Amino acid sequence: MTVGSDGAFTGAATCMGYALFFKENTLHSSMAPSLRIFSSPPALPGLPKTRRASLCVLNETLYYLSPDGVMAWDGSIPTKCPGALDSGRLANVQSAVGSALDGRYYLHVARTAAGENTARLLVYDTERALWSEENVCSYEMTSTGGQLYLWDGQALWAADPSREADWQATDGVEEKLNFELTTGDIGLDGAEDRYLSRLTLRLDAECSSTVEVAASYDGGPWETVASLTAQDKRRSFDLPFVPRRHGTLRLRLKGRGQITLRSIAKTMAAAKGGIAGGEV
């Protein structure tokens, strides 16, 4: 068979009964069992040969890393995945590997920047259209459908240790993880006759965990304002603290274990000093 585009094929995948054949700057599709090739417009994002391993089918959608970013193909034309992802940090990629677990697309990328080799493990939540970055522990991945395994060259990792049997000694792995979360600026942009009198953090502890909350007022240094030690599994906690007067506020949660931040509630109070107030 021949197709009306230049260049060698760089990758192939199947999705929704289609066979997809990629080139650097385009893709071609064939609907089984027909052998007829349907050519896409040449302007559609293709697949560099160094990124062919990023191809991954998840919930009847094909994901891959193109020169324009992470793309999703669901039977029509490829579209860029939503969410804040710096396309500049995806340039000069030497290799890309993709896999999936529980509605999440895992993408390991290795690239050269400023003469240094860097690697990142990006995770895209397809249900919430959110990107996150996890600790790099792989350059090869494979999924069984119920578990995702990652190989770092020396050890084999499981993405969800709770799915492994006890004899494989993965219990407690989550409890040993250190975590850190930093918010952006929380501005007080409401009426100026109120001020923020208290913040209450709603936290869930999946296992025995510790967490320390620090605040940065108006871009200043971090100050520890609250802490929590959770001993029981799957418990919910309210962690309140009283901030001092400020214009903007950032929060940092740092600890060990597994903590989920469910909400941040603001309590406002009347003021006469012209401090602006925020909304819950």
Image: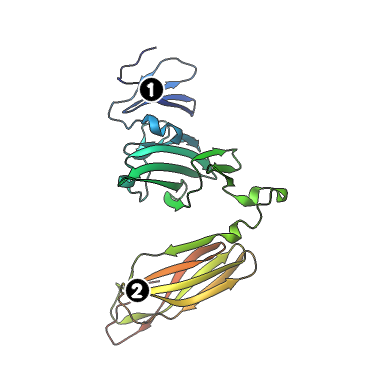
Residue pictured at 65% horizontal, 68% vertical = 232
Left or right: residue 123 versus residue 221 is: right
Residue pictured at 31% horizontal, 17% vertical = 4
Toward which corner of the image does residue 222 lie, by quadrant?
bottom left
Residue 19 position, x and y percent, is: 46, 23
User: Is the image coloured rainbow, by chain, by secondary structure, or in one colour?
Assistant: rainbow
Residue pictured at 55% horizontal, 65% vertical = 256
Residue 117 position, x and y percent, is: 38, 45
* Residue 48: numbered disc: none
Q: Amino acid at mark 1?
A: Phe
Residue 7 position, x and y percent, is: 32, 21
Residue pictured at 44% horizontal, 36% vertical = 54
Toward which corner of the image does residue 243 lie, by quadrant?
bottom left
157 and 155: which is toward the camera: 155
89 and 250: which is toward the camera: 89
* Residue 9: numbered disc: 1
Q: Say whether disc 1 or disc 2 marks the residue closer to the N-terminus.
A: 1
Left or right: residue 248 versus residue 103 is: left
Q: Is residue 210 above or below residue 16?
A: below
| Circle 1: element type | strand
Q: Amino acid at mark 2?
A: Gly
Q: Residues within 10 Å of mark 2 (few under 14, many from 20)?
A: some
Q: Which residue is mark 2?
A: 278
Disc number lying in front (1 or 2): 1
Question: Marks 1 and 2, how far apart in space?
Answer: 55 Å
